[in-house]
Image (cartoon, rainbow, N blue to C red):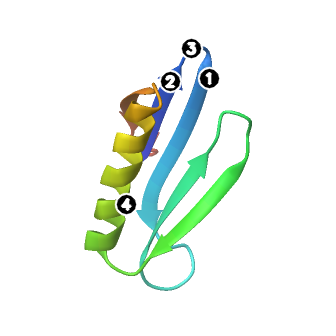
């Protein structure tokens, strides 16, 4: 699932997905400047907790969102 946060003309994209290599889950964060960060978690509880932290952090920094896109199109 893709999530987008906007602030002015900038956009941050977050993708929450199953790990691409091995078990677990990943959050891929693409910053407005194009820099990409990858975070790996072993359980769905861990990735969900981190997603909540990120969401609150973005809101605190003045980002609007998230808008979603499921990536299947």
Q: Which residue is mark 4?
A: 50
Above or below for 44 versus 6? below
Mark before the other along the chain sequence, 3 or 4: 3
Q: CA distance from mark 4 to mark 2?
A: 19 Å
Measured from the top left, where is residue 43 in percent x and y? 32, 78
User: Front-most of 2 and 38?
Assistant: 38
Q: CA distance from mark 1 to mark 3?
A: 6 Å
Are discs 4 and 2 less than 8 Å apart at CB? no
Q: Which residue is mark 1?
A: 10
Residue at image location 47% in from the left, 34% down from the top = 4
Are discs 1 and 3 less than 8 Å apart at CB? yes
Q: Which residue is mark 3?
A: 8
Are discs 2 and 1 less than 8 Å apart at CB? yes
Circle 1: is it few (<14), some (14-19), or many (20+) Cα within 10 Å? few
Extreme residue toward the left, this view? 45
Q: CA distance from mark 2 to mark 3?
A: 6 Å
Q: Is residue 65 left or right of residue 8?
A: left
Circle 3: is it few (<14), some (14-19), or many (20+) Cα within 10 Å? few
Q: Which residue is mark 2?
A: 6
The answer to whether one can see residue 70 in this image is no
């Amino acid at each position: 699932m893709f999530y987008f946060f906007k602030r002015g003309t900038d956009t941050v994209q977050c993708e929450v997905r199953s790990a691409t290599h091995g078990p677990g889950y990943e959050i891929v964060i693409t910053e407005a400047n194009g820099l990409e960060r990858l975070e790996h978690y072993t359980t769905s509880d861990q990735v969900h907790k981190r997603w909540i932290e990120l969401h609150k952090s973005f809101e605190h920094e003045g980002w609007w969102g998230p808008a979603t896109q499921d990536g299947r199109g």
